[in-house]
Amino acid sequence: MAARKLRTVLVITAVFIFIIHWSFFRSSSLRPLSAVGNTEVAKPGCPTSPLLGDVLVVLRTGATEAREKLPVHFETVLTCIPNYVIYSDFTEDIAGHHLLDVLDGAVDEKLRQSNPDFELYNKLRASGRDGLEYQTSFGSGSGGATDNPGWKLDKWKFMPMVERALSHRPDAKWFVFVEGDTYLVWQNMLEWLSKFDHRQPHYLGKHMYIGDKVTQKWRENKAEIEAYTAQEWAGDMVLGKPDHNGLERVQAGARAVVLPPATFHHMNRVEYEALWAFEQHWLRDHQSGSSFPRFRDMFKAVVLPQLRPRRDSWDNMAAGTQYSTELLADLSDADRNALSLAERQALISFEHCRRACESKPDCIQFSFSQGRCTTSKELRLGHTADSPCLEYSNAASKCLRPAAYRENSLGSSPDFIQAGWMMDRIANYVERLDNSCGHIEKEWLV
């Protein structure tokens, strides 16, 4: 087993490019591969594929988030996946599904007792969920600040997770790794994998790299890898530590809008259910199984209907040019005079912010919050204003609150942040997307 290559590892972290903020052990045993076979008749609303019985989906979670994030998986996508296992940092049952402690016996005992990253884990082992304090119940993914106890513990699960998955299902052709806030587009994943040779070592995912013979490297270099893990903030960086010679890395490029997505990351329950409903309609309308949903299809069905000239209590995550009293004060006289009247008045009100956006030909959306206007040429949907924080910033995945959240109490005004989209420009934008598809309409990224 040590010399056997891990044929495929998928570390799925792709994010919907339009930003809608954008698997598990049943009972005590996973349904055997032989009982599934390659000709299983799929359930209503589920895709069919010769690969159905050859893929092991592995969900990584943690005690601080499992009860919140897992139920929607059990109610939706996992009903279509015949082989999955759930790895956590605590052995328990949730809604009749068994979670395994992937760290049990996988980490050096001295390290576990001495490294503060394991404080949460040691409490779980000693007292179970009764040992959890409110301060530790922030989740290990969404809201994953680097000082979050669940987040710090999460990075230690990656290498043991890969080894356990391989030992658990050595005859699987593919291993798909997802997180608690990942939506898996199962029909697209199966079709995508069918285009690769499972006998070759592939690493398919985003950004982070992985090496050949991962489990062998883990077993032979545990002390070195554990030392590296202690220094890093994210587990996928640890997973990518071994050399990646001979492995294939696949990432989406500018053509992503017409490509079939395999996953969406940083999803909340509402977004998860919206995509599941979309997929159910798609499967009913395309029963031949020869057509697969693409980013464009999902955007038109899920995102576009939610865009409007004004949405109160909504943060569309506009990222671009900001206008506020303090920012304008920091400008030089020359730069301030170079602004148009609409830009200088943008911070006054929602309507003034709209006019500032209208004055810029490439502005497609904007947001306003008590003396602060942000205009943007990037199209985003965003989330309700009562969301506690942005999922992740670009700075080491720290959970951040935008200025509107820091400066206002959520209870002070239901409309402290408002969003708007330039609907006429969005119509033109969508038309340009459609016209750009052309010859790549049926492409897959391989």
Image (cartoon, grey):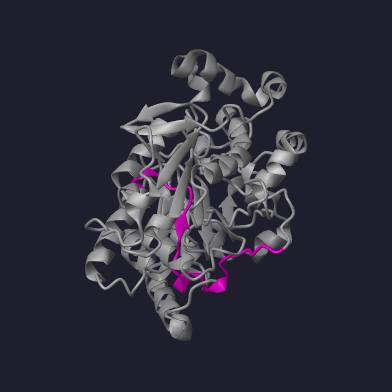
Name the residue nearer the viewer: 85 or 89. Answer: 85
State whether residue 175 is above or below residue 308: above
Quarter of the view holding residue 433: bottom left
Q: Position of residue 337 (x, y in %)?
A: 66, 63
Judge from the rendering whether residue 247 lies leftward or rightward of residue 37; answer left or right: right
Q: Position of residue 376 (x, y in %)?
A: 53, 61
Q: Which residue is at 68% across, 18% downward?
A: 113
Q: Position of residue 204 (x, y in %)?
A: 57, 60
Furthest residue to the bottom? 439
Name the residue nearer the viewer: 159 or 141. Answer: 159
Q: Main secondary structure of the magenta part?
A: loop
Name the residue nearer the viewer: 216 or 154. Answer: 216
Q: Which region shows up in magenta? A: 246-271
Q: Which residue is at 40% across, 62% downward?
A: 51
Q: Position of residue 184 (x, y in %)?
A: 42, 54
State whether residue 21 is above or below residue 399: below
